[in-house]
Image (cartoon, rainbow, N blue to C red):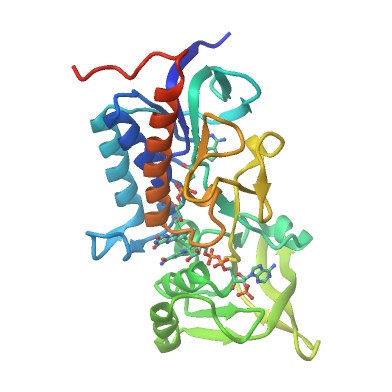
Amino acid sequence: MGDTRHTRVLIIGSGPAGYTAAVYASRAMLKPLLVQGIQPGGQLTITTEVENWPGETEIQGPDLMVKMQEHATAMGAEVISDIITSLDLSKRPFTAKGDGGTTYTADAVILATGAQAKWLGLPSEEKFKGFGVSACATCDGFFYRGREVVVIGGGNTAVEEALFLTNFATKVTLIHRRDELRCEKILEHRARANPKIVFAWNKVPEEILGTEEPMGVTGVRVKDTKTGEESVIPCDGFFVAIGHAPASDLVKDQLELHHGGYVKVEPGSTRTSIPGVFAAGDLTDHVYRQAVTSAGMGCMAALDAERWLAEQSDLPAAEAAE
Ligand code: FAD
Ligand code: NAP
């Protein structure tokens, strides 16, 4: 049997939204517990340079997240290495079960579980995952020194991944289903100026090709979206960068969701469909999905939780400053 921990505010997730909520909830004397999940630090830990975090012209994603964790801890938050496997929002206190055996009970919950990489859904993608198919250039790019790789997608992630992979690969082919990128112009400019990057416009992958002994990727069969013509692009690595889906599985049958799984919050707030449950960051945001907007929503969630807790006559007030 595991132990039970009670907290006024349970924060689930350790990306910019979770850590910012932790800073604010700590400063409100709510002594929050923050459960980090399987990816401590969140999505920014799988990127390199971050150039749009105010106050830092350039900072490595993992370094930024270490700083955020240190900030939350310094303010008094308890950061716990655990994964929430189930969450019961049907009665108060809310109950969360941790993978490590701990049961967490909480007067208020801040959900900040972010988003996870999307996959194409091809059987051949599944077959070669970890054997040439990846969704993280920062993690796996090093294996492709002197080799040729493909990146699929046309957003910021795909173009950043393509640029990063030019540090290792001899050639990076960016496959996009349209003939126009959706990434920021500065990234597009860099990609177009990079002689190692080749664009394959209006193409969708049909099958990832490879060998079984040894297990590895040798190319990708693509179809032209305009002509229907098929062709093969040889490559040793296939990087999927087609966006992210909200990590709302824990609450999908309990909270109102919209836009394909994003937690719905009242406009201008972080209040979900259950009083006392707040949501912030990429989990709720199908529009902006940035570190700074997630952090902003983390702040809002902590302030919303603090106000909501103060209105509950059956709960104790926040602790006075020591
Ligand atoms: P996330 O960062 O997704 O964090 C979610 C957290 O929830 C993780 O810690 C995870 O472990 C935790 N979690 C999930 N499920 C559970 C569970 N069951 N139990 C406990 N914890 C759980 N944005 C920018 O502004 N600038 C950039 O340069 C930039 N670069 C990017 C590069 C890449 C490759 C990617 C993928 C994204 C990038 N973004 C960038 C977007 C940015 O990373 C996200 O908008 C931001 O991280 C979202 O923050 P978040 O706190 O909502 O969630
Ligand atoms: P995204 O902006 O949603 O882009 C996904 C790309 O993949 C799009 O180009 C899309 O094509 C393509 N795509 C989607 N499904 C596909 C499929 N099944 N087959 C082929 N192509 C497919 O996702 P993202 O690039 O991961 O970015 C997510 C968020 O994080 C964005 O808000 C982004 O701004 C942010 N981010 C920011 C930075 C930064 O600030 N430097 C870096 C990375 C990410 P279409 O264009 O045709 O839809």
Give whichever of 81, 93 is nearer the camera: 93
Q: Quadrant of the C terminus?
A: top left
Question: Which residue is at a point 55% across and 24% down the rendered structure image?
Answer: 98
In the rendered view, tell whether residue 112 sits above or below residue 282: above
**Residue 257 in the image: above or below residue 224:** above
Task: Say above or below: 246 vs 81.
Answer: below
- Quarter of the image where one finds residue 14: top left
Q: Nearer the viewer, residue 235 or 32?
A: 32
Q: Residue at position x 60%, y 47% from top? A: 264
Q: Is residue 38 visible?
A: no
In depth, the one of 267 and 210 nearer the eye is 267
* Location of residue 3 in the rendering, given as x and y in whole percent from the top left corner: 51, 10
Residue 23 falls left or right of residue 244: left
On the image, the x and y values in percent for residue 46 come to: 44, 54
| Image point (61%, 37%), residue name | 273
| 145, above or below 259, in the image | below
The N terminus, quarter of image: top right
Q: Residue furthest left?
A: 322
Q: How many marks?
A: 0
Q: Note whether residue 141 is visible.
A: yes
Residue 175 appears left or right of 208 = left
Question: Would you say 67 lies left or right of 212 here?
Answer: left
Q: Residue furthest bottom?
A: 227
Q: Is residue 33 left or right of residue 122?
A: left
Q: Quadrant of residue 151?
A: bottom right
Q: Residue most toward the top? A: 1
* Residue 99 x, y percent position in the rendering: 57, 25
What residue is rendered at 49% in x and 43% in y?
270
Where is residue 282 drawn, in percent x and y? 51, 51
